[in-house]
């Protein structure tokens, strides 16, 4: 005799109507959902395409880097330090004791996209210092709010060889040791000194807050100075650089490069850089009690 009972793996579900398929640019308001614009759909497709090709792109980059290292070895060219070598290049063991601070107290002056760009520049700054033979003493101060949330997306940042704190830089260092770097300053930085702390403003604002860092330094009685770009180069644009570019210049000079060579190597060509050929000044590198490190 046949049973009319349902099998145990069958479920009693009401016959609900299926959601209609939404075509591109079609409003979904009639289905109780927010409308999806063509622009949003385009962004979603672009994101899906990027995720799909990310691993393939990384594999190609690794293969290209491996091939480049092989060619460099054959030609006797020293490549970048390997991971095992980097373990020995720490701030604690570094011969350079000059401190550089990135002041991250400007979250309220940036939108979300600018905060993301700021954190990307922090990542490159850290990477540059980590790969240096003698890293500088690097600090990220006032890390909180949106910047902290963005930083948390990068797993393990708490273990990086950088001193991260939510404290302000002027709570950590004596006022007389601080030099806030600003292109608006009338003072020109001539050399790096190991008993000084050089502060870079962690602000990505596309000139929306022109002179902000300089004004804050003046208001707080903090010493300030600009990099000596004008001593060596003509620039068609304002002498405002990204966080990582400023740090990279300081890192190069701390390693023994002249200001001029560091500027020519690092400042992007799009800034309209022209060398002042009639000037041949060189500045000392990372100095400790009058001696080069």
Image: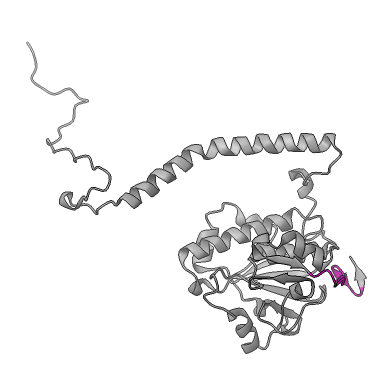
User: What residue is at 67 percent from the left and 58 percent from the top?
Assistant: 126
| Image side of residue 135 versus residue 272, left or right | right
User: Residue 156 at what x, y percent from top left?
Assistant: 60, 52
Coordinates of residue 35 in the picture (x, y in percent): 24, 53
Q: Nearer the viewer, residue 27 or 167?
A: 27
28 or 158: nearer the eye? Answer: 28
Q: How is the image coloured?
A: one colour
In the image, the segment drawn in magenta is: 276-290
Find residue 219 and report its horizontal and vertical position in percent: 62, 89
User: Which is the main secondary structure of the residues drawn in magenta?
Assistant: loop
Query: Does residue 282 belong to the magenta stretch?
Result: yes
Which residue occupies the foreground of this view, 192 or 42? 42
- Can you say whether 195 is above or below 249 in the image? below
Residue placed at 83% from the left, 44% from the top?
Answer: 78
Q: Quadrant of the C terminus?
A: bottom right
Would residue 272 be found to the left or right of residue 177 on screen? left
Left or right of 50? Residue 90 is: right
- Quadrant of the rendered structure where residue 118 is? bottom right
Give how far across and how far down residue 7 sits, in percent. Answer: 17, 22
| Position of the N terminus by quadrant | top left
| In the image: residue 230, left or right of residue 3 | right
Q: Could you tell me if residue 136 is visible in this image?
A: no
């Amino acid at each position: 005799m046949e049973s009319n009972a349902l099998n145990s793996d069958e479920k009693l579900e009401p016959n609900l109507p299926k959601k209609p398929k939404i075509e591109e640019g079609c409003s979904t308001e009639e289905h109780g959902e927010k409308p999806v614009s063509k622009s949003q759909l385009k962004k979603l497709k672009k994101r899906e395409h990027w995720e799909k090709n990310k691993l393939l792109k990384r594999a190609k980059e690794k293969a290209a880097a491996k091939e480049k290292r092989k060619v460099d070895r054959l030609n006797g060219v020293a490549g970048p330090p390997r991971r095992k070598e980097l373990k020995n290049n720490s701030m604690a063991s570094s011969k350079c004791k000059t401190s550089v601070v990135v002041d991250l107290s400007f979250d309220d002056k940036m939108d979300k996209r600018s905060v993301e760009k700021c954190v990307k520049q922090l990542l490159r700054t850290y990477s540059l210092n980590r790969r240096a033979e003698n890293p500088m003493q690097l600090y990220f101060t006032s890390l909180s709010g949106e910047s902290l949330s963005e930083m948390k997306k990068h797993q393990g940042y708490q273990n990086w060889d950088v001193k991260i704190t939510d404290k302000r830089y002027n709570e950590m260092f004596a006022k007389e040791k601080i030099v806030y770097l600003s292109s608006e300053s009338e003072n020109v930085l001539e050399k790096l000194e190991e008993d000084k702390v050089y502060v870079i403003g962690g602000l990505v604002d596309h000139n929306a807050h022109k002179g902000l860092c300089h004004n804050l330094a003046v208001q707080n009685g903090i010493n300030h100075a600009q990099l000596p770009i004008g001593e060596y180069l003509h620039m068609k644009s304002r002498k405002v650089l990204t966080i990582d570019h400023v740090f990279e210049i300081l890192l190069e000079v701390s390693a023994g490069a002249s200001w001029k060579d560091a500027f020519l190597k690092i400042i992007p060509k799009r800034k309209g850089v022209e060398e002042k050929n009639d000037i041949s000044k060189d500045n000392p590198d990372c100095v400790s009690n009058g001696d080069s490190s």
